[in-house]
């Protein structure tokens, strides 16, 4: 996979030389290039921003500078063709624009982006990038994703780009040494938080590792971990419990969740007018 990152702070992306992503680059699995947007300026002051039309605080990044940069980088691989309605052919690079106004970047989005041959990440600063840039590349037939890494405000797109490159990079074939870890993750993606993990020493600061983990009883360990995952998820992420598919819960799971105030409702002829409703988890009032 090739990833181009464009930013006015290329040094911010230096962390991508390290660790897993750095290893993937050295192994030739990831061709990652970081570019300084100012290389595409034409004036003496290397200006990338201007005042917002309509007024308001702050500055906005100019579309002409971004257009020169992205034309160079997005057309470098397969040229885009304006697709016919319903056409789904490859359209050159996929443009990713981190923005606080974007759709949320999730593991699913990371998995989708990991299937692309070429990503271009456009890191904005100030109040962001002139809105015509995303529109233009979309109408030119490129895939364009405006994505936010979460509900908090950053000063620019660089940290979000780091997050996205790391999340996508580790999904590339051959990057994570042990593909078993990725298989376990996609099980975890069945909708629960991870169970707690422990290592040596077995006693530390008067705290013991839970006895069951030292027992060697594989089935009991599995059940204990599942219970811990259910308890954690109920305590920390009730939204994830509500989104669980009850079909994937065994009787013991349901008992644990009932003890935490969650019950399975529906799934029988108990919808409005006696119609069958789909089963779901609901918090019971206490
Ligand atoms: C890209 C510039 C700074 C700060 C206006 C009005 C927005 C832009 N999860 C995420 N948080 N922040 C970003 C992100 C921030 C960026 C840029 C990404 C480019 N900035 C900036 C404030 C505002 N605010 C009130 O609502 C919030 C605009 C991001 C991602 N991905």
Image (tube, rainbow, N blue to C red):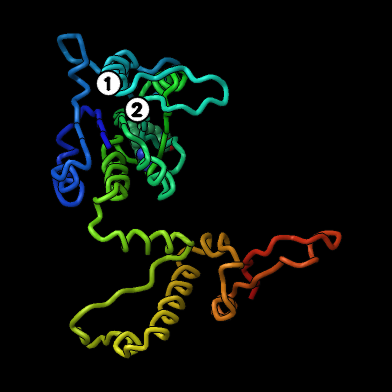
Query: In the picture shown, does residue 195 fall above or below 31?
Result: below
Instruction: Name the residue located 23 percent from the left edge and 29 percent from the top edge.
Output: 7
- Number of on-image labels: 2
Q: Position of residue 11 (x, y in %)?
A: 14, 35
**In terms of image quadrants, where is residue 118?**
top left
Q: Position of residue 197 (x, y in %)?
A: 30, 74
The tag earlier along the polypeptide, 1 or 2, is: 1
Instruction: Name the residue located 45 percent from the left edge and 81 percent from the top edge.
Output: 223
Q: Depth check: 115 or 164 in front?
A: 115
Ligand 1's image quarter is top left
**In terms of image quadrants, where is residue 114?**
top left
Q: Position of residue 243 (x, y in %)?
A: 56, 59
Please identify the residue farthest to the top as the structure is shown: 43
Query: In the picture shown, does residue 151 fall above or below 45?
Result: below
Indicate the quadrant containing the C terminus: top left, top right, bottom left or bottom right: bottom right
In 3D space, how far apart are the residues under numbered discs 1 and 2 (Cα atoms)?
A: 9 Å
Please identify the residue farthest to the right as the structure is shown: 273
Mark 2, residue position: 93
Q: Position of residue 270 (x, y in %)?
A: 79, 66
Q: Depth check: 259 or 173 in front?
A: 173
Q: From the viewer's perspective, tell me whether residue 40 is left or right of residue 250.
A: left
Mark 1, residue position: 76
Kindly indicate whether the residue at mark 2 contacts the one at mark 1 (C-beta within 8 angstroms): yes
Q: From the viewer's perspective, tell me whether residue 269 is left or right of residue 212.
A: right
């Amino acid at each position: 996979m090739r990833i181009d990152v464009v930013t006015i702070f290329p040094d911010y992306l230096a962390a991508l030389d390290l660790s897993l992503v750095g290893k993937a680059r050295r192994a030739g699995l990831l061709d990652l290039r970081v570019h300084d947007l100012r290389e595409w300026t034409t004036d003496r002051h290397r200006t990338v921003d201007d005042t917002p039309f309509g007024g308001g605080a702050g500055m906005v990044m100019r579309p002409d500078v971004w257009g020169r940069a992205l034309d160079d980088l997005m057309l470098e691989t397969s040229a885009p063709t304006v697709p016919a309605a319903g056409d789904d052919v490859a359209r050159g690079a996929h443009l990713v624009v981190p923005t606080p106004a974007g759709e949320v970047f999730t593991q699913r989005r990371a998995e989708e982006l990991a299937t692309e041959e070429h990503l271009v990440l456009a890191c904005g600063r100030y109040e962001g990038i002139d809105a015509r840039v995303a529109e233009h590349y979309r109408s030119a037939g490129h895939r364009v994703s405006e994505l936010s890494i979460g509900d908090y405000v950053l000063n620019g797109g660089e940290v979000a780009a780091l997050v996205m490159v790391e999340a996508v990079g580790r999904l590339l074939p051959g990057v994570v040494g042990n593909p078993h870890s990725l298989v376990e993750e996609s099980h975890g993606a069945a909708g629960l938080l991870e169970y707690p993990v422990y290592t040596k020493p077995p006693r530390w600061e008067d705290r013991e590792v839970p006895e069951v983990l030292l027992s060697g009883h594989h089935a009991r360990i599995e059940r204990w971990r599942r219970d811990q995952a259910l308890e954690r998820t109920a305590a920390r992420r009730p939204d994830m419990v509500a989104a669980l598919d009850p079909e994937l819960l065994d009787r013991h799971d349901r008992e644990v969740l009932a003890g935490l105030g969650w019950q399975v409702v529906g799934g029988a002829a108990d919808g409005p007018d006696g119609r069958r409703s789909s089963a779901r988890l609901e918090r019971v009032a206490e």
